[in-house]
Image (tube, helix red, strand yellow):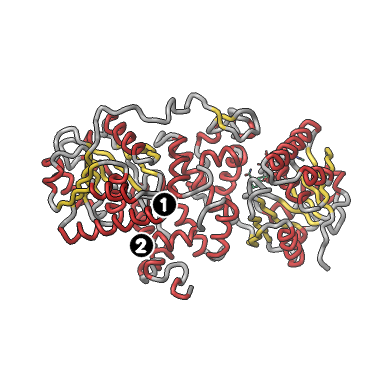
Amino acid sequence: MTREFASVGVVGLGTMGAGIVEVFARNGIDVVAVEISDAALDRGRANLTGSTNRAVARGKLAEADRDALLGRVTFAVGLDALHSVDLVIEAVPEHLDLKQRLFAELDRVCKPEAILATNTSSLSVTEISVATARPNQVVGIHFFNPAPVMKLVEVVRTVVTSADVVADVEALCKRLGKVDVTISDRAGFIANALLFGYLNHAVDLFESRYATREDIDAAMKLGCGLPMGPLALMDLIGLDTAYEILDTMYRRGGRDRRHAPVPLLKQMVTAGLLGRKSGRGFYTYERPGSPKVVPDEQTPTTTEPAASDQAVTKIGIVGSGTMATGIIEVFANAGYEVVSVTRGAEQSAKVFEAVRTSLNKGVVRGRLSEVDRDAALGRINWSATLDHLADVDLVVEAVVEELSVKKALFASLDEICKPGVVLATTTSSLPVIEMAMATQRPADVVGLHFFNPAPAMPLVEIVRTIRTSAETVTTAQVVSATLGKTGVVCGDRSGFIVNALLFSYLNDAVRMLEASYSTADDIDHAMKLGCGYPMGPFELLDVVGLDVALAIQRELYLELREPGFAPAPLLEHLVTAGYLGRKTGRGFRDHTRR
Ligand SMILES: NC(=O)c1ccc[n+]([C@@H]2O[C@H](COP(=O)([O-])OP(=O)(O)OC[C@H]3O[C@@H](n4cnc5c(N)ncnc54)[C@H](O)[C@@H]3O)[C@@H](O)[C@H]2O)c1
């Protein structure tokens, strides 16, 4: 017979527990909310009232419904209050011994038929379950932060969890309006196993001063459409919790060094910088628990880059592919005079057509007037020889991604262009310093990594080599701002910020599929509904192209020699088989049948 779940218990009312109480109570279920002390109970109650009050203020919850919701919650100190509930879910700190002791106690207090659930993110549900005399009634119910908002619940079944317990918990998740994926007991389950390597990698970039916190976060939000940057997300999760999750994943998940918590994390936790909940983590918040970031000593003094001495009005753009075409449009549309250099009249005609078609779309959508379109087109000069770049102020090259070709081009630009010109490459994977050293003026060479489609994507990565001058970086920042893009500054390492963080995560998803832990559909679901990603990893890989992903991943691996970055064999096989994604009709999914 299916269980009814008339009342449930929640133990621990911190970041997750308070949200879980809200989810149950919102859906008409009576909740007994338990904490360890009166002071912690007061904090938990404040977490719940704060969250429900915000929902009322935003018009997402009626006042009467909030009152009814709060009326369904009984607060108590100590586990004895849980004697008659049908299910208990715990959300106490991520320590195995603490959870085992708690489960032994719950087993004693709760009625025999009650289900005992853990919200652990990384610990073994099996190890927790054997602390009780009812391991077949123990299950993982892993909510995502913030629990009232995120749709996903991972239901974790151990080898001894009864099938009827899993079925009843799945039905309960549906009743709560959640989407559940049921998986076996592996460190990090689906979402965290893919998320935490990425988060730790981002902390590593920050610790090594590869880029600022603002730039790392902006890069991932604007370059990948993620709802939050990785460092802001770490603050939301809580650095102590994140540390424990990484530490457990490292120990349980095959000692992948990418999961070994970056030293800075431990230091921050020891210093009490736990993220939002303590008022300070990577960022500083208005007060503990507040989502509002306030300026601190790391906040850039102004969002506008300092004015540059290098006046830039005329731009040379070399290349005729997708990126060159988009970049020509971006500059011309922003009012710059453009000299486009392609390999011949035929290519120039094609690029002209592509730019005109794209600008016309802007006219049809009402974003651009016909006059402005014609003015933008009129600002582009078409040429088939580099000699016409003698008097430009900035060159952006977007030719084929081959080092020998790019180096030869930079050597020619060095001969042709006037002194003081900024020479930029839009390479996504080659070392910018190689191109800089092909010239006699490495201080003037910088990476300007646009994203595809350039007119739509708001991000530009400004890549500073060890020879790039501060003035060149400033000019690149000013130009990016004039284009209406957010320029983030980073060092000259493989993948820069976005691709280094993004493609390693995509590669991890392929490994997870290869290990048959879950399906492509469930993994895509987990990342979209659990982490708010606009696309799941397999959807994105099919759009980006598996060959592109493989090439980037190979570069990352070759440069960093980190075994965890080695391209997944399945990715290599699919590319060898010609399954490159949408462009060939088949990648992880068959697009010819849809
Ligand atoms: N933070 C996240 O984003 C997130 C997401 C999903 C799952 N989780 C998991 O949820 C669990 C809780 O994490 P959190 O971030 O909410 O932690 P937290 O530190 O914010 O809250 C933990 C709460 O548990 C209470 N507590 C400690 N010992 C207790 C006991 N013996 N009895 C009753 N209450 C006790 C503490 O007073 C505190 O309020 C962890 O297992 C974590 O891995 C966290």
Q: Is there CB contact under 8 Å for labels 2 and 1?
A: no
Percent x, y of residue 286: 61, 28
Residue 577 showing in the rendered view: yes
Disc 1 crowd, CA 10 A, few/some/many (<14, 14-19, 20+): few
Mark 2 close to ligand 1, CB under 8 Å: no
Compared with 301, 526 (above or below) is: below
Residue 429 showing in the rendered view: no
* Residue labelled with disc 2: 547
Q: Which mark is residue 240?
A: none
Percent x, y of residue 235: 57, 37
Disc 2 crowd, CA 10 A, few/some/many (<14, 14-19, 20+): many
Between 75 and 207, which is closer to the camera in this rendering? Answer: 75
Return the disc, 2 or 1, that comes first in the chain's sequence. 1
* Residue labelled with disc 1: 366
Quarter holding the N terminus? bottom right
Compared with 352, 299 (above or below) is: above
Between 491 and 135, which is closer to the camera in this rendering? Answer: 491
Q: For residue 542, which quarter of the picture?
A: bottom left
Q: Disc 2 marks which amino acid?
A: Asp
Q: Disc 1 marks which amino acid?
A: Gly
**What is the secondary structure assignment of the residue under circle 1?**
loop
- Residue positioned 83% across, 46% down in the render: 72
The answer for how far apart the CA atoms under marks 2 and 1 are is: 36 Å
Percent x, y of residue 182: 65, 62
**What is the secondary structure assignment of the residue under circle 2?**
helix
Between 420 and 183, which is closer to the camera in this rendering? Answer: 420
- Residue positioned 63% across, 33% down in the render: 290
Between 33 and 95, which is closer to the camera in this rendering? Answer: 33
- Is 454 placed left or right of 272 in the picture? left
Label 2 vs label 1, nearer the camera: 1
- Is 346 placed left or right of 546 in the picture? left
Ligand 1 location (quadrant)? top right
